[in-house]
Image (cartoon, rainbow, N blue to C red):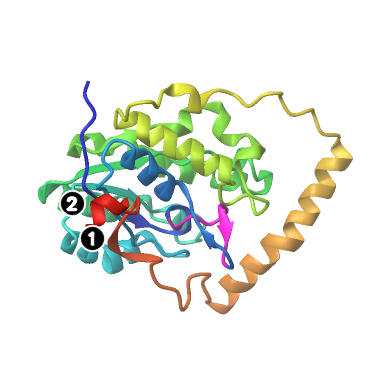
């Protein structure tokens, strides 16, 4: 199957799409959407790309704050990922999240865009304390997989064991590491039949990680809870969000690759 040549790519979502975990706020975050744009620009050098994602956003907020802006950019490719922040909240409603996702999928497709999403890895394999969220992840992924009925391209990355390898996750365990972001980008590029990308993104990392002792595991959990869980709980209690005061890092379509001198003349 030949690869489509996209000219206008717009990404909608939360911190995962923004790129948290791949870079930092001083040098800038990159992330799987930026990396996917690089893959696509290898096929279509004139590709332009916008990233409307803002960390901390719930699915309803992504729909309310980003959908109209995305439609105004008239993308021929859009990625949509939302709902992870919702499943961390006590009032999680899988059907409501699914309705927000469906509304975004259908609006973008109705305007002529190819829409891509992917299933959420089982974070309970990365964060043992998150085991009570297992059923919520299953419910969210059920909605994401069902998006194929709208014509959405769904990369089912959650079905591959490698996505819960700790080396694909940042130290906060909620966001991917640079390697994890690159694996997701490659998975989406494969789903879009981008030349030069194959299924090797799903290969297990080598060498396998050694088994940790019980003492090392407990110590790691305590350090993670102190460094990341406690601040997150503090924001929930005070009604703050990691995205407060933030806006999209790339709100307008911009070239992915700078024009060469002879192209600029």
Q: Residue at x 33, y 56 (%)?
A: 12
259 to 207, vertically: above or below: below
Q: Residue at x 38, y 25 (%)?
A: 196
Label at residue 70: 1
Q: Judge the density around disc 2: few (<14), some (14-19), many (≥20) Cα neighbours within 10 Å.
A: many
Name the residue nearer the viewer: 53 or 140: 53
Position of residue 211 in the picture relative to residue 234 (left or right): right
Span colored in magenta = 18-25
Residue 19 magenta: yes
Q: Judge the density around disc 1: few (<14), some (14-19), many (≥20) Cα neighbours within 10 Å.
A: many
Position of residue 103 in the picture relative to residue 183 (left or right): left
151 to 92, vertically: above or below: above
- Residue 236, how many percent across, how many down? 57, 71
Residue 55 magenta: no
Asked whether the residues under the numbered discs 2 and 1 touch, taking CB atoms below 8 Å apart as contact, a structural biologist would say yes
Residue matched to label 2: 108
| Magenta stretch: helix, strand or loop mostly | loop
- Residue 59, how many percent across, how many down? 36, 59
Helix, strand or loop under label 2: helix
For the question of whether residue 126 can be seen, the reply is: yes
The quadrant in which residue 155 appears is top left
Q: Residue at x 80, y 54 (%)?
A: 222
**Quadrant (top left, top right, bottom left, bottom right) of the C terminus:** bottom left
- Residue 23, how many percent across, how many down? 57, 56
């Amino acid at each position: 199957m030949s690869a489509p040549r996209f000219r206008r790519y717009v990404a909608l979502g939360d911190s995962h799409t923004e790129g948290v975990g791949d870079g930092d706020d001083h040098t800038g975050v990159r992330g799987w959407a930026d990396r996917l744009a690089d893959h696509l620009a290898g096929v279509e050098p004139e590709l332009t790309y916008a990233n409307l994602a803002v960390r901390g956003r719930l699915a309803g907020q992504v729909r309310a704050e980003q959908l109209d802006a995305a439609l105004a950019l008239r993308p021929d490719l859009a990625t949509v990922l939302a709902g992870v922040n919702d499943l961390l909240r006590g009032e999680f409603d899988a059907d409501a999240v699914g309705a927000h996702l469906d509304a975004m999928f259908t609006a973008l497709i109705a305007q002529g865009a190819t829409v891509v999403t992917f299933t959420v890895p089982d974070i309970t394999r990365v964060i043992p304390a998150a085991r009570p969220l297992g059923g919520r992840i299953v419910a969210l992924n059920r909605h994401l997989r069902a998006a194929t009925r709208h014509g959405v391209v769904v990369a089912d990355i959650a079905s591959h064991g490698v996505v819960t390898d700790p080396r694909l996750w940042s130290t906060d365990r909620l966001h991917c590491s640079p390697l994890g972001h690159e694996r997701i980008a490659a998975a989406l590029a494969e789903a879009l039949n981008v030349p030069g990308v194959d299924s090797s993104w799903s290969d297990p990392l080598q060498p396998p990680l050694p088994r940790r002792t019980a003492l090392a595991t407990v110590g790691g959990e305590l350090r993670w809870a102190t460094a990341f869980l406690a601040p997150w709980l503090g924001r929930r209690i005070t009604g703050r969000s990691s995205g407060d005061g933030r806006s999209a890092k790339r709100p307008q379509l911009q070239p992915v690759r700078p024009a060469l001198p002879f192209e600029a003349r």
